[in-house]
Amino acid sequence: MPRLTLVVPAYNVQGYIGECLDSVLGQDFADFEVIGVDDCSPDGSGAILDTYAARDDRLRVLHLTENVGLGRARNAGLELATGDYVLFLDSDDTLAPGSLAAIAARLDATDDPDVLIYDYTRTYWDGRHLRNTRSELLSEDGPAVFSLAERPRLLDLLQIVWNKAYRRDFVSRHGFRFPPGYYEDAPWTYSSLIAAERIAVLDRSCVLYRQRREGGNILRTVSRKHFDVFDQYDRVFAFLEGHPELESWRPALFQKMADHFLTVLERPGRLPRDARSEFFHRAAEVYRARLPEGFERPPGGRGYKYALLGMDAYSAFFGLTRANSVRHRARLGGRARVGRARRAALGVLYRCGLRMPLDENLAVFSAYWGRGYSCNPAAIEAELGRLAPRMRRVWAVRSEHRDRVPAGVEKVIVGSRAYWTVMARAKYLTNNVNFGDTVVKREGQIHLQTHHGTPLKTMGLDQARYPASTSMDMEKLLRRCDRWDYSLSSNRFSTTVWERVYPCRFTTLETGYPRNDVLVNATAADVVAARRELGLADGTTAFLYMPTHREYEKSFTPRLDLSKLAEDLGPDVTLLVRGHYFYKPAGRLAELQAGGRIIDVSGHGNVEELYLAADALITDYSSAMFDYANLDRPIVIHADDWDTYRVVRGTYFDLMAEPPGAVARTQERLTAILGSDEWRGEKAAALRTAFRKRYCDYDDGRAAERVVRRVFLGEKTLLPVVPLAERIPAPSPAEAAGRH
């Protein structure tokens, strides 16, 4: 029997649950179990729970066959609990390091109280941490164990269950269970506190309470479901009436109920406008029915609101709060004026265009900050032309890159009159990065964010932890991301990262990356053609070298002596060298090409054709490895500065422990790998197979079609994904030469 049981319900938290479980399973206290409850979550939360359970037998997973809501999911986990104490943790929150050890020690020191209350800290997307403002109530001064009557102000703490450890036999004796509804914590919290004979506190912040920027808390959602508060307080008072010995708590619970009613009425963004008066009148009815004899209202304005509630004086109550409403509207109006001033800077043309109807058959595409026609947007644009030829497709490109748009593809120059016209009128805007800050998201417009790689390196908000790698304004970044309607993902790993580091209200589409369709669909003739275009002779082994960008390097500096590497590998090997697009073309590469066995492909417009032509990929930390893995061809990692890169940029996993193939930390080791069969041997193949299982979830050759059908044609269901084991990648160069 473990000392502690943690019940962790999960629903639509795939971006956060991994961090939650890491914070629990990584504690320095081991005498606990975790019951993870998959509340029939439609995302990958259940699968993530299973993955962790397979690695750690302290976690057991219960998969519910229907969605029952937070309260009843907790109940399901409670039924499986075997620990002396039960703790509840929401799956988007985390435990602070050392918390379980501190909780267990405090339970021992206080001789197993009925309830132990500990503190929490609110954490915000911008890195702020704010401890509970009423943390003074958890002072450990005075008796170690007490009843609520001795410290009644503990009722003033936020009515939550996840800041407490409950002795399991105490819970069983009273039959505590969570009801359904929005406010399921109220009956449990109040009933358990007034029933507890022995309470202890721990003056330590144990839970990091995530304040989700995109509004993950359902209590902040405009809905009639807030009427649920009446049912929950019926349950509170039903418990009280079933325990006459607790009658003295009636006035305190009545005040908590009245305060809760007023909170729902006064907080913006809870009740629909047409439901406010109905809620008020019902609250007034309940107030009068439950008013304890001799109850004294609190002093000041709060007490005056109690009086208005007791008189069912909605008009007077509304008049009292009108000033606050006016101030709120003034703040909104100020933001609107700022917005109007910003839009004014865009020019008369754009402002006029924004007032005109959207063109339902106009789609604008862009990629890599206007650098040309490429990546996922290009694949989607081409597929849209096949499935919906009536749609006008326009490519936005910067003037210096206009020649990178193929003939026959309509283009506009970023910043031109034509650009602002289509940006104002287009129904669909697609990009693999963000459009500029001056672009306005119109009502009815659809913004599709395709991304441009699987993240090994930290992205979004996580970059703030690595200031040496970024000077990005995170608030501005998230305002740009707020425009997204859809975010594409090529694997479940990416989904969990994108949803956490870009906390905005987009819908994830797990479609695969459209740019990778060709890696599955290409024929032997396509592979042969790609090699001929590069001038690769039959029988030549082509290694594609693609190092990533490093924030601490201002220009492309190959981390290899390419001339020596080519010389050491011999005349039958050609190196295709592609510098990162952040870097200007390197003159040194042009010199190296003179020998014929090094080809600078940095300016090649289609990296997927380079993938098809290459026998193997050599890279360091580039997301190219995730794409190239779809070909099931060898990948070699050259990581001479891995330790520096991890510290400066930050990474999501240890590439040295989970590589897609052979790893070299020096040029000498790389030469040895490439000069033998190690780069394509059995060990390298086994590593690649495991890597593909982790990161090639959805790239089955139909990603572009999925995107077009879902986003542009409005189909509700995504095409099913072909399992990895059933996919047949494009043939290797050797296979293609034999078939052609």
Image (tube, rainbow, N blue to C red):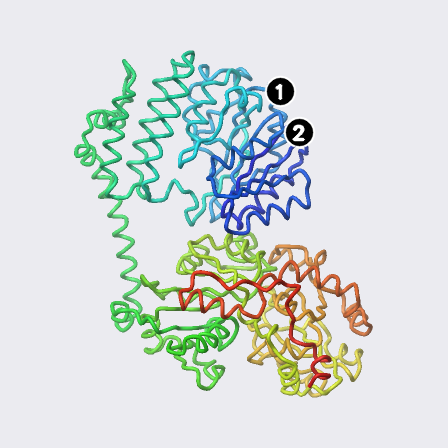
Query: Which image quarter is the N terminus in?
Result: top right
- 1 or 2: mark nearer the eye: 2
Residue 30 position (above or below residue 12): above
Q: Is residue 681 left or right of residue 363?
A: right
Q: Is residue 67 left or right of residue 320?
A: right
Q: Which residue is painted at 38% across and 40% down in the image?
A: 219
Residue 416 position (above or below residue 139): below
Density class for disc 1 (Cα within 10 Å; few <14, some 14-19, many ≥20) is few
Question: As rendered, which of 214 and 427 lies closer to the eye?
Answer: 427
**Residue 194 seen in the current view:** yes
Q: In this view, does 219 lie to the left or right of 10?
A: left
Amino acid type, mark 1: Ala
The kind of secondary structure element at disc 1 is helix
Residue 310 appears at what percent x and percent y? 22, 24
Q: How far apart are marks 1 and 2 (CA)?
A: 18 Å
Residue 236 quadrant: top left
Residue 30 appears at what percent x and percent y? 68, 34
Query: Which image quarter is the C terminus in?
Result: bottom right
Query: Label 2 belongs to which residue?
Result: 2
Task: Name the disc covering residue 208, or none.
Answer: none
Residue 658 appears at what percent x and percent y? 70, 57
The kind of secondary structure element at disc 2 is loop
Amino acid type, mark 2: Pro
Residue 222 appears at what percent x and percent y? 33, 44
Question: As rendered, which of 738 and 502 lies closer to the eye?
Answer: 738
Q: Which residue is painted at 59% across and 19% down in the image?
A: 110
Question: As rendered, which of 419 and 160 lies closer to the eye?
Answer: 160
Query: Label 1 belongs to which residue?
Result: 109
Residue 434 quadrant: bottom left
**Residue 588 seen in the current view:** no
Earlier-in-chain disc, 1 versus 2 = 2
